[in-house]
């Protein structure tokens, strides 16, 4: 394999991870909600999540090849047809909610731990996002390859340092298996909607995607084992756990959370920018995207997480469900045309 090919593989690896791993992973909140609350069945839900992701990635890759699709906008136009504008509206709302949540989360964290002026962190992150999305996918890749390795290192070290094998208790409660599978799939659907546009910007091959999914599943597994061997009461259990490593690492992990917030913000803002700008560079569109995120973040972190994230999850689920149905229809049409041409 050529040197440039190896470098590109690494770049795409961190790009995909940056599109999926965010503050929910770093804080541990998402892991708790979607996996740990089901005890040992969480491991079954984790397997369901991993298989779903691999399947969806491979299906998208297959249809890209068969229908000769080169971009996310082209993909939407071909797959959704007349529904393209409607699905774009849904997905824009979804990305805006997530972006606003990241900004509100940054304000909440700085206010809670450092008593920093309420909107300063979100304004700073918005300005950085504005500059980066104007720089295009190359800037996104550059930033991802700087911050994602740091995130991965801190999350894994924090997890391994907080696993107590003697205390791990993951008994499977009766009747939780099917619910755990459902939540694992729902977790996959929510994250897939965010990662899909970035997927078209990546040249990652099948083995690379499998390795990416295995990395993500590994992080989730470590978090499950941490939660199973410790008792936490905060909304950010993995952040609370970081204090057990050392006081210095506690602050390092705080920075990790901010990086995770920004990683998700950057990807979601870029996705909206690409949809609204129709793949053309536009300062005006970039400004609209970041200002809309900033305005919505004023609702507050608690409200966004409690209510708007539910809306975002429903939108993601509906979007992916329609996506799967439309892909199936397109594949059937493709097969019929191919059979007809072979006659």
Image (cartoon, rainbow, N blue to C red):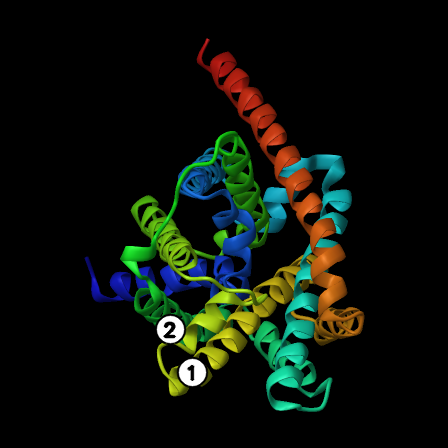
| Residue 136 found in image quarter | bottom right
Q: Provide the secondary structure element on which disc 1 rests.
A: helix
Question: Which label was assigned to residue 252?
Answer: 1
Residue at horizontal 34%, vertical 48%?
205
Q: Is residue 203 visible?
A: no
Q: Quadrant of the N terminus?
A: bottom left
Q: Which disc, if any, is residue 154?
A: 2
Q: Nearer the viewer, residue 258 or 170?
A: 170
The residue under the point 80% across, 69% down is 299
Counting from the top left corner in percent of width and height, residue 303 is at 76, 64
**Distance of label 1 from label 2 (alpha carbons):** 8 Å
Please indicate, yes or no, whether residue 3 appears anywhere in the rendered image: yes
Taking the image as shown, residue 86 lies to the left or right of residue 65, namely right
For the residue carrying disc 2, how many other residues have a C-alpha within 10 Å: few (<14), some (14-19), or many (20+)?
Answer: some
Q: Residue furthest top?
A: 343
Q: Residues within 10 Å of mark 1 (few under 14, many from 20)?
A: few
**60 lies left or right of 300:** left
Residue nearer the viewer, 317 or 338: 317
The percent coordinates of residue 40 (x first, y second) are 41, 41
Secondary structure type for disc 2: helix
Tell me where residue 305 appears, x and y as whole percent: 69, 61
* Quarter-of-image position of residue 328: top right
> At 62% from the left edge and 80% from the top edge, which residue is drawn?
125
Residue at the spot 32% in from the left edge and 62% down from the top edge? 163
Name the one closer to the observer, 37 or 29: 37
Location of residue 266 (image quadrant): bottom right
Image vertical order of residue 337 relative to residue 125, above or below: above
| First along the sequence among labels 1 and 2 | 2
> How far across and how far down the image is residue 254, in percent?
49, 80
The relative height of residue 3 versus residue 91 in the rendered view (above or below) is below
Tags 1 and 2 in contact by the CB under 8 Å rule? yes
């Amino acid at each position: 394999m050529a040197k440039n090919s190896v470098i590109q593989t690494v770049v795409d690896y961190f790009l995909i991870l940056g599109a999926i791993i965010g503050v929910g992973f770093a804080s541990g909140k998402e892991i708790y909600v979607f996996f740990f609350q089901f005890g040992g069945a969480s491991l079954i839900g984790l397997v369901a999540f991993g298989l779903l992701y691999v399947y969806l990635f491979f299906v998208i890759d297959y249809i890209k090849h068969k229908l000769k699709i080169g971009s996310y906008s082209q993909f939407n136009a071909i797959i959704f047809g007349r529904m393209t504008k409607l699905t774009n509206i849904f997905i824009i709302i979804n990305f805006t909610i997530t972006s606003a949540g990241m900004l509100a989360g940054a304000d909440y964290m700085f206010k809670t731990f450092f008593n920093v002026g309420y909107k300063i962190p979100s304004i700073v992150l918005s300005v950085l996002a504005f500059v980066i999305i104007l720089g295009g996918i190359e800037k996104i890749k550059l930033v991802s390859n700087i911050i994602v390795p740091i995130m991965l290192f801190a999350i894994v070290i924090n997890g391994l340092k907080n696993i107590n094998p003697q205390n791990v208790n993951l008994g499977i409660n009766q009747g939780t298996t099917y619910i755990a599978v459902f939540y694992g799939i729902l977790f996959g659907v929510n994250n897939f909607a965010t990662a899909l546009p970035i997927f078209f910007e990546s040249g990652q091959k099948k083995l690379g995607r499998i390795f990416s999914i295995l990395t993500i599943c590994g992080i989730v597994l470590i978090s499950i084992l941490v939660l199973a061997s410790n008792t936490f009461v905060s909304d950010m259990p993995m952040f609370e756990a970081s204090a057990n490593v050392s006081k210095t690492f506690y602050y390092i992990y705080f920075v990790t959370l901010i990086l995770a917030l920004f990683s998700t913000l950057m990807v979601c803002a870029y996705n909206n920018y690409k949809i609204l700008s129709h793949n053309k560079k536009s300062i005006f569109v970039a400004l609209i995207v970041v200002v809309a995120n900033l305005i919505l973040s004023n609702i507050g972190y608690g409200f966004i997480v409690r209510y708007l994230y539910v809306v975002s999850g429903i939108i993601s689920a509906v979007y992916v469900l329609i996506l799967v149905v439309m892909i199936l229809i397109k594949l059937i049409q493709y097969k019929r045309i191919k059979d007809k041409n072979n006659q």
